Amino acid sequence: MSKLTLTPFRKNLAQAVTCLAPIKKTIKKTIKKTINNEVKKTIVDEVNYQIPIVANPNGAPLITKLPALFSRGVYLSEEYKTESMTLSLTSQDGTQSPDEKAVHEFLKSLIEKCKNSIMEYSQEMKDLPLGITEEELNSLDNFIYSSDDKKTSTFHLRLVGSGTYKTRFFDGNSKDKKIIPTPELYMDKEKKVFHPVHVTPVIRVNHVWISPSKISLSISLVDAQVTPKEEEEEEERVDFF
């Protein structure tokens, strides 16, 4: 992996990026079955757009280290063969620490910066699909997931797993930067087996992805320092009769 510059995390970091770098357009041949699952199939061209997000003014990748956040571990998707880590932006009661609030505001500002830039220039750039609406771009807000009662918020980061570089997890209790194997941090939602840790993540803001089915924001987890969450002391049990 080539040497990359780490941009210091700060309150207005989102204002120092642009998402109008050269756009990558890909055409994927997709087979769609006809009505009622009949044998006849139709091959259609699915056009996807990848809009890189880069740091101004040199156009380098935006890589920054976020403050420590709480996580329940790495989620492995067997269906898509991908690994992600979910990070919390609030406590269970809905309150936010200063660090959680800072990251939350950064992500919201980044999303708004992307939406505004794309809307402003979409009609002038032939590489973008015509007719993209503000409502469609609002789906970028889904990068931050809020619970049904709106009390808690989380977001997830895709682990880097292709090429010669992979996401590394460093043991925060080790002085020699011991690496923790990713499978040791897996969580099983069905069995409700979690590995609660505090994570100081180094992230890379990648791109906005536009496909016929969705518009999404891609941010990867490059490196992370993890320390086990301290177990809360149980309250003294009192038996009543």
Image: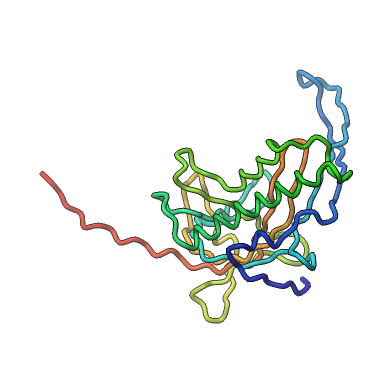
The spot of residue 97 in percent (x, y) is 44, 60
Image quarter of residue 220:
bottom right
The N terminus: image quadrant: bottom right
The spot of residue 61 in percent (x, y) is 75, 64
Q: What residue sits 84% from the left and 35% below the top?
A: 30
Q: What residue sits 69% from the left and 59% below the top?
A: 205
Q: Front-most of 28 and 108?
A: 108
The spot of residue 164 in percent (x, y) is 77, 66
Q: Front-most of 169 and 151?
A: 151
- Seen in the image, is 239 located left or right of residue 20? left
When the figure is inspected, residue 225 is found, relative to residue 105, above or below; the finding is below
- Seen in the image, is 95 located left or right of residue 46? left
Residue at the outermost left position: 241
Image quarter of residue 233:
bottom left
- The colour scheme of the drawn protein is rainbow
- Total numbered labels placed on residues in the image: 0
Q: Front-most of 132 and 94?
A: 132
The C terminus: image quadrant: top left
When the figure is inspected, residue 179 is found, relative to residue 189, above or below; the finding is below
Q: What residue sits 62% from the left and 54% below the top?
A: 109
Residue at the outermost top position: 36
